[in-house]
Image: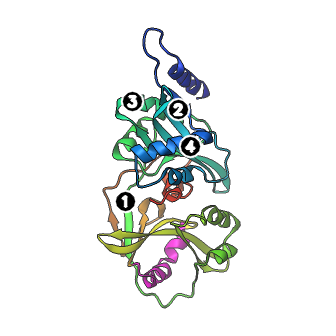
Amino acid sequence: MNVLQDESLTLLRVADSKTAALPTIEPIGDSDLPAFCQFLNEHLSSERSAEQWAQAFQQNWGVTKPNNGFLIRDQGRIVGGIGSIFAQRIIRGKPEQFCNITSWCVLDAYRAQSMRLAMAVASQPGFHFTDLTPTAIVSKTLQFFKFKPMNERHAVWPNIPWPFSRLRIITELDDIEEVLAAEDAKVFRDHRHLPWVRHASVGRPGAYCHIVWKPNRLKGVPGAMVLAFSDAGLFLRYRYAIGSYLLGQGYLYTRVESRLLPRLPKLVWELAGFHNKVFRSDTLTESDISNLYSEIVGLDL
């Protein structure tokens, strides 16, 4: 894989003596981030400033990142790129390194370079790869590089009053970490600084579940989109208490990606028709692919 990547990048840098030089594909270093993120602001979404784009790539998530993705230059000008967010997660007691692909944007005149750009990212050894916010075209394109589509359905259930629970629900940031197991507490610390995601610890001594969620709306109805939880079994066991708490905050339903659940609970319906998130891994399954440590939380999406 290293040889293939090196040869591909070399080919992109060699000018044919009889024609104009091809655009070059280069890794995005930290010094390139301001210019690349300004490019994203101008050509992908002006709703976020260049500084806000850059924040997603500047997280300290436990891995020495080789780059921030790759970009295309033509005579010194950025004409395209793919961002990458790197992180290390503990899965079943083993550290795993991830490269989360995001913000793929190439100017129309340079679309022919897009596959070489994707190859530069996907050829990096030692990582599990994800793209959690792909367009339909990007999802299909990455499947060409052996990325697998994940179940795109969302499970939704109503939040109802539940006065029978004796579970404790902790929402103060300074208290949440105290009751969590060490690995779960680290996940909380890695994300507590992001103001657009919300956290809670739910449970009892020795059996607390960390949940991460954001406000959500379906046809104007306010609800909670649960992005992640530390224990799927506990999350389902505690769902009535969690729902009762959310209802008290004005959120009428709980929504979570079906792929994250070991089973669908009762009184649930599924939403379909979303773009397939994709991943590539030789050892992990889609239930291992978290929304944390990605652009879903690194950006206010």
Mark 1 lies on a secondary structure that is loop
Count of all numbered marks drawn on residues in the image: 4
Residue 263 x, y percent position in the rendering: 44, 66
In the rendered image, which residue does mark 4 sit on? 33
Q: Residue at x 54, y 53 (%)?
A: 56
Q: Nearer the viewer, mark 3 or mark 2?
A: 3
Q: Nearer the viewer, residue 114 or 285?
A: 114
Asked if residue 237 lies in the magenta stretch, the reply is yes
Q: Is any atom of residue 280 visible in this view? A: no
Q: Residues within 10 Å of mark 1 (few under 14, many from 20)?
A: some
The residue sitting at the bottom extreme is 163
Which numbered disc covers residue 153? Answer: 1
Mark 4 lies on a secondary structure that is helix
Q: Amino acid at mark 2?
A: Ala
Q: Of the residues under marks 4 and 3, which one precedes in the sequence?
A: 4
In the rendered image, which residue does mark 3 sit on? 110
Q: Give the CA distance from mark 2 to mark 4.
A: 18 Å
Res 20 quadrant in image: top left
Asked if residue 205 lies in the magenta stretch, the reply is no
Q: Nearer the viewer, mark 1 or mark 4?
A: 4
Q: Which quadrant of the rendered structure holds the C terminus?
A: bottom left
Mark 3 lies on a secondary structure that is helix
Q: Which quadrant of the rendered structure holds the N terminus?
A: top right
Q: Of the residues under marks 2 and 4, which one precedes in the sequence?
A: 4
The residues colored magenta run 232-251
Q: Amino acid at mark 1?
A: Arg
Q: Give the CA distance from mark 1 to mark 4.
A: 34 Å
Q: Residues within 10 Å of mark 4 (few under 14, many from 20)?
A: many
Q: Give the CA distance from mark 3 to mark 1.
A: 34 Å
Vertical comparison of 68 with 90: above or below: above
Residue 168 x, y percent position in the rendering: 59, 83
